[in-house]
Each structure stands twice: as structure tokens, then as C-alpha cells.
Amino acid sequence: MATIFSKIIAGEIPSYKVAENEQFYAFLDINPLAKGHTLVVPKKEVDYIFDLPDDELAQMHVFAKSVAKAIEKCIPCQRIGVAVLGLEVPHAHIHLVPINSETDMIFSNPKLKLTEQEFKDIASSIFQAWKKI
Ligand code: AMP
């Protein structure tokens, strides 16, 4: 059965897209730790990130770097924190989280409640910035 992220990539479930190429897709986390919290996923369905072949793992990180650079241009923050958990969705993904302090990366922190319009505006600004990277 396809994962929820494969359904998102296929367009069967809506998402707030921030970047895409042939191999990878990036979209806003629906329960964000911060404005701009983004997930980067391979289009190929693999559960555990460290089961990806070396070249794909490397390419995924290079793609995530381009997305992080775009987020930085849109969301005021000290830097972009990077995390891999994968305990909830069995489809490899990298979390990119705009942070100003160590505690901004605590995944048990309360999540932000954003309106649909806020999600749309954030995603669109990151996507525009990403296209210029
Ligand atoms: P984890 O597998 O522990 O890295 O957590 C999965 C992440 O995916 C969580 O931060 C969820 O908020 C996020 N998530 C789950 N479903 C969706 C969705 N439909 N759209 C965007 N983000 C999602």
C-alpha cells in the first residue's frame, strides 16, 4: 500500500509544495514546529533513509540544501535545523526547520496552528525563492 507521502507526491492528497525535481519532492509539514518547517522526500518509496543507495542519499541531501537555502530567504531564522525521525510515516524524509535556538528542534514542542492561507503564502514564497537558487 502506498504511503501517505507517495499519495502526496502523486497529487492524490493535497500538499503545500515548496520544491520538486525528478527524484525528490519538498512540502510544508502540516504540524510545523516553526513557520517554514519542510519535509524533503524521495519520490521512490523507501521506508528507512539509510536504506537508500549512497548516490541517492547524497542527492537527497544536495536537494535538501537547495530547499534550506530557499527557506532561509523567506523565514527569518539563525539557520535551518535538520532532523530525520521517520517514526510516524514509513517513507524516508528529512525535516528542515528554521531555528533560533536549540529548543526549537524539540519535536514534542507544541506545533503551530497556521491557516490555509498562511501555509499557501509560506509555500509559495519558498517555491519562488527555490526556483532562483
Ligand atoms: P516522522 O515520521 O516522525 O518524521 O513524522 C512525520 C511528519 O510528517 C510529522 O511531522 C507530521 O506532521 C508530518 N505529516 C504527516 N502527514 C502529513 C501530511 N499529510 N502533510 C504534511 N505533513 C505531514
Image (cartoon, rainbow, N blue to C red):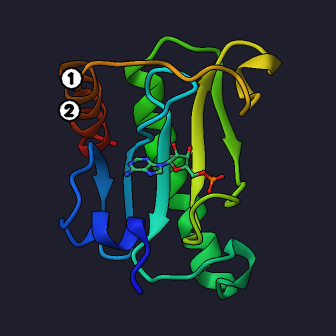
Three-letter code for the amino acid on which mark 2 is drawn? Ser
Q: Position of residue 10 (x, y in %)?
A: 23, 72
Q: Nearer the viewer, residue 24 or 66?
A: 24
Give the residue displayed 18% in from the left and 21% down from the top. 117
Q: Is residue 90 above or below residue 82?
A: below
> Counting other residues with Cα less than 10 Å from the Cα at mark 2, is it few (<14), some (14-19), or many (20 or more)?
some
Q: Name the residue under label 2.
A: 124
Within 8 Å of ligand 1, the CB of disc 1? Answer: no
Q: In which quarter of the image is residue 90?
A: bottom right
User: Can you see residue 21?
Assistant: no
Give the residue displayed 72% in from the left and 55% down from the top. 85
Q: Quadrant of residue 111?
A: top right
Q: Is residue 50 above or below residue 101?
A: below
User: Can you see residue 102?
Assistant: yes
Asked if the residue at tag 1 contacts the one at tag 2, i.e. Cβ–Cβ closer than 8 Å, the answer is yes
Residue projecting furthest to the right: 102
Q: Position of residue 64 (x, y in %)?
A: 52, 53
Q: Nearer the viewer, residue 94 or 55?
A: 94
Q: Is mark 2 on a helix, strand or loop?
A: helix
Q: Which of 80 and 94 is in front in this view?
A: 94
Q: Is mark 1 on a helix, strand or loop?
A: helix
Q: Is residue 30 above or below residue 60?
A: above
Q: Mark 1 points at which residue?
A: 121
Three-letter code for the amino acid on which mark 1 is drawn? Asp
Give the residue displayed 57% in from the left and 80% down from the top. 56
Say left or right for 129 vs 39.
left
Say left or right for 78 vs 39.
right
Marks 2 and 1 sit apart, C-alpha to C-alpha, by: 5 Å
